Image (spheres, rainbow, N blue to C red):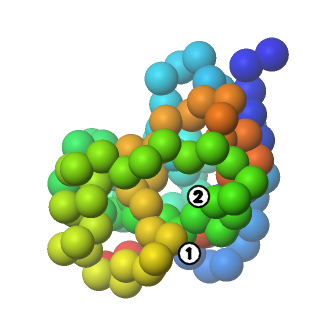
Amino acid sequence: MSDIKITIIDREGKSHEVDAPTDMNMNIMEVVRAYELAEEGTIGICGGMAMCASCQCYVLNEKDVNLPEKNPDEEAMLWEAFNVKENSRLGCQIHITEEINGLIVELAPES
Ligand code: FES
């Protein structure tokens, strides 16, 4: 049993509860792409290097999960990105682990 549940609200406001594997070294951005929850070419543009912010999402239930702190690259990119809020994170920097089971994120608008 290595799947966790993640809820992803797409850019149209539609909510999707998806299973995400903890044993495939995936991150949130890759899960969004795997389930085609954002239009091709609008997410994951830098390939998950914390250099484009196309994977920005808002974490809606931070207190329910054990999210890792932002790393310096993520901090720096969010500093420059558009539509940034208090609860913004880069999906590519959040790895799928047991600690984030039940996470709810909303994709930030395309910028
Ligand atoms: Fe580019 Fe996450 S995919 S910052």
Say which element carries label 1. Answer: loop
Q: Quadrant of the N terminus?
A: top right
* Percent coordinates x, y for residue 10 in the rendering: 61, 68
In the picture, the disc for residue 37 is 2
Q: Secondary structure at mark 2?
A: loop
Residue 107 visible somewhere in the drawing: no
Determine which quarter of the picture holds residue 60.
Answer: bottom right
For residue 79, side relative to residue 29 (left or right): left
Disc number placed over residue 79 in the picture, else none: none
Q: In front: 14, or 28? A: 28
Q: Position of residue 86 (x, y in %)?
A: 46, 77
Residue 11: name its quadrant: bottom right
- When the figure is inspected, residue 40 is found, relative to residue 4, above or below; the finding is below
Q: Is residue 32 above or below residue 42?
A: above
Asked whether the viewer can see residue 105, the reply is: yes
Residue shown at 43% from the left, 61% from the top: 89
Q: Earlier in the sequence, mark 2 or mark 1?
A: 1
Q: Which residue is mark 1?
A: 11
Inter-mark Cα distance, 2 to 1: 8 Å
> Callout 1, which amino acid?
Arg
Whether residue 72 sits left or right of residue 66 in the image: it is left
Q: Is mark 2 within 8 Å of ligand 1?
A: no
- Dot 1 alpha-carbon crowd within 10 angstroms: few under 14, some 14 to 19, many 20 or more: some
Question: Neighbour class for label 2 at 10 Å: few (<14), some, many (≥20)?
Answer: many
Three-letter code for the amino acid on which mark 2 is drawn: Leu
Q: Quadrant of the C terminus?
A: bottom left
Q: x, y (%) of residue 77?
A: 22, 62
Question: Eyeballing the image, is 49 above or below 79?
Answer: above
Mark 2–mark 1 CB contact (< 8 Å): no
Residue in the image at 22% along x and 50% along y: 72
The residue located at (76%, 47%) in the rendering is 102
Q: Position of residue 61 (x, y in %)?
A: 69, 63
